[in-house]
Amino acid sequence: MEPLFAVLVGALFTVAFYLFLSKHIIRILMGAAILSNGVNLLIFTAGRVTREVPPVIGHDADVLSASAANPLPQALILTAIVIAFSFFAFLLVLGFRTFQKLETDRSDEMRLAEPVSEPSPPVGY
Amino acid sequence: MRTVIFRSIAPFLTSLMVLFSIFVLLRGHNEPGGGFIGGLIAASALAIYGIACGVAAVRRAIYFHPMALSAFGLFMATVAGVLSVFASVPFMSGLWTYPVIFGVELALSSVLVFDVGVYLVVVGAIGSIALGLEEGDRD
Amino acid sequence: MAVPSTPLEDLSVAYLMEPVAAADWLIPAPVVWCLLVGSVLVMLRKRTALQPLIAIPSLMVLVFITLGLLWHVAVNGTVTMTMGRWLPPFGISFTVDLLSAFFAATSSLVALAAGIYGRSDVDDSSRRYGFYPFLLLIMAGILGAFLTGDIFNLYVWFEVLLISSFGLLVLGSRPVQLDGAVKYAFLNLIATTLFLVATGYLYGLFGTLNMADIAIKASELRGAAPLMTLVTLFLLAFAMKAAAFPVNFWLPASYHTPRIVVSAMFAGLLTKVGIYALLRILGMLFPVERQELSFLIALAAAFTMILGVMGALAQNDIRRAMGFLVISGIGVMMAGLALGSPAGLSGAILYAAHSMVVMTALYFAVGISARLGSSFKLTEAGGLYARNAAVAGLTLVLFLSVAGLPPFSGFWPKIMLVKASLDVGAWWLAGAILMTGLLTTIAVGRIWALAYWRPAPEAADGAGETPDPMDTQPLSFGATAALGGLVVITIAAGVWPEPVMALAQEAARGLLDPSAYVQSVFPVEASQ
């Protein structure tokens, strides 16, 4: 299973980095969303893929059965999903607001903070 | 989306979903469920009510601003962790008490306080995003 | 499935723990306090007059808590609290050694100064949108990152501080802020995602996320696992957070756009969290791999400091020049990390603390210069010495301090670093540090000559864009006091450096020999 997942993670990363190379904010945002999914899959694979025994302690037991899945990567992924989701929501709103105010979503046209025609500092007075 | 059918059903659906979210929240300690998923259900209930009856109606119905709800949840969750100072155990330790009320033993814990806090954080945060987007739609 | 490092029977010990001493509550207290006050402030976000009245005393309390924690650690050594009675390595530990406590104390001093300065620098609408709540929440993130002993928890605190910094960055949402925020947000998101990738690999290799546990296992796994890949990924992710060359471009694009007090906080604290993470993970957990990478780090450091200060020389906007000076300082700290010797690491630690105080104060000084009627543009600025000689004098102290001239706090860490690089024969690194000092002196000297010393230029009005009304309001006592307080710290640390130097050296020893750190987390195993 792991090689398959590794290839899948690689594919997701490739798509994400390709999208990062775009000038359009919305595509970079898509790239970030895909990258976060790739990372989640990576953590899942890093926690070892096992047979489908859920990590739940039954009523008649005190410890997990040895064959149960590793619960920690799932907790990590859940945290990462929540964070990635909130970031995605924030960046979507930020990108949209920027598009409304600056009337562009191309990153190379956003030169308000770094103006092109900034004069050089004076050399004397 | 403001059809008569949807508008008449939405309040019932919302109250049912909020009730269910509280059920999910409370069963969360030993079974699947908990504050996070309960909060998501409650936030989607608010979103449905907002789609059917307008954002203003939702804001009136929840009375507090969603961000204030969220902040109160954060406060509660932190306080739940601090409670363990009184038991001389590390931060965030679960503390349990079993009062008997009307002959029924109730298992109350600081974990529950924390979970209710998480529930409020999620309802507030997701609710304010959803209401914000729905408001933006109508401009 | 990773093998748990503790046999299952030992878990019963978790419930036979000794009661927690009251002093140990200082460990989570800074973070808990910030979260509590921050959430109360969010609830009160419409009471804009009340917010600073709650926030500033709370920040004072925070300073006392972190100073108490520093005292506790200095007296009792490294201390640990593991949350919720889950034994390490399973539970999340907060482990505080001298490095963590020193950075925590310095950063809360800076936050207090920012809180006081912010009183007159943010208007009611920015307060309603959460300047003070975000200030407290970003402090929770920063302090959490300094205090935690768990790598995934470190990631979570990074995200907490990142999301609060987004909030602070767009306060007021002028178009230029949105422009800067887009670049800041995307590049930082990519950096933290890289950090998460590295954390995923780390978990796959080690089966643990507890830093002390990793420190034990790293020596066993060395040679059997691709640790170099892992460490290089961590280096890239944290270098991006710290704005080291060649991944520094988000910083000068965004740091000059928000309110001055927000820029000051960011310049003082955010990049230093990246440096802290580099010191902790490369310096303490993976010293062998850091040694392998030392040439690469040194090269990046030299480029960062030289190109940073050259960027500062080329800027007409004083705020942007300050942004480049932040980058240049990051290069100096990275040089200490590259050296890795006790002297190098302690130099880096001391320089980081110096930079927290001085960079924040520099942004305050720039904000105050605008309030005294000067401009952010060098071509239009002037006449500040004639208007207010005291502020001009304080600013000159800061300028000399950031350039690393005696008798101010920037001097000693640079001496330590130059000596440490000469000790290992890295003359070019020593040369780069000295060269940076010279170029910084030129850059800040020119700013002082043009904006402060020369007479005010005549009627250049109407040429530039209309300034924000908050930028030109009269100078308040609080703003001057915040600046003056930080200047006093830099002078005190320059004239009487022994205590902080001893602290930094002790902290560096703790990084190089993590046995005290490990023993603090695993007292049971160590006593067996």
Image (cartoon, rainbow, N blue to C red):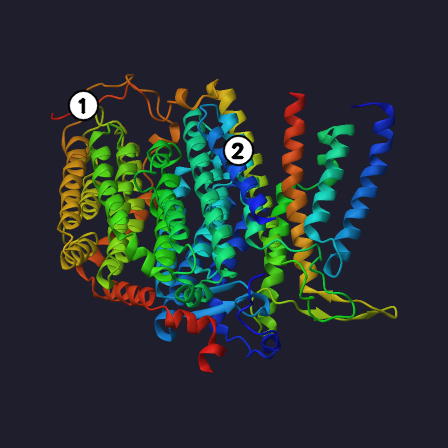
Amino acid type of the residue tagged 1 in the rendering: Pro
Say left or right for C181 vs A63. left
Element at label 2: helix
Distance from Cα at disc 1 to Cα at disc 2: 42 Å
Q: Nearer the viewer, residue C360 or C76?
A: C76
**Dot 2, how many residues are within 10 Å of its Cα: few (below 14), some (14-19), or many (20+)?**
many
For the residues labelled 1 and 2, say whether their Cβ atoms are less than 8 Å apart. Answer: no
Of circles 1 and 2, the one toward us is 2
At which x and y percent is residue B104? 86, 68
Disc number for residue C457:
1
Disc number for residue C92:
none
Can residue C421 be seen in this snapshot? yes
Which subunit holds the residue at mark 1? C
Say left or right for C464 vs C18. left
Disc number for residue A91:
2
Residue at 59% across / 46% down in the picture? C43
Relative to residue B67, is residue B115 depicted above or below? below
Which subunit holds the residue at mark 2? A
Element at label 1: loop
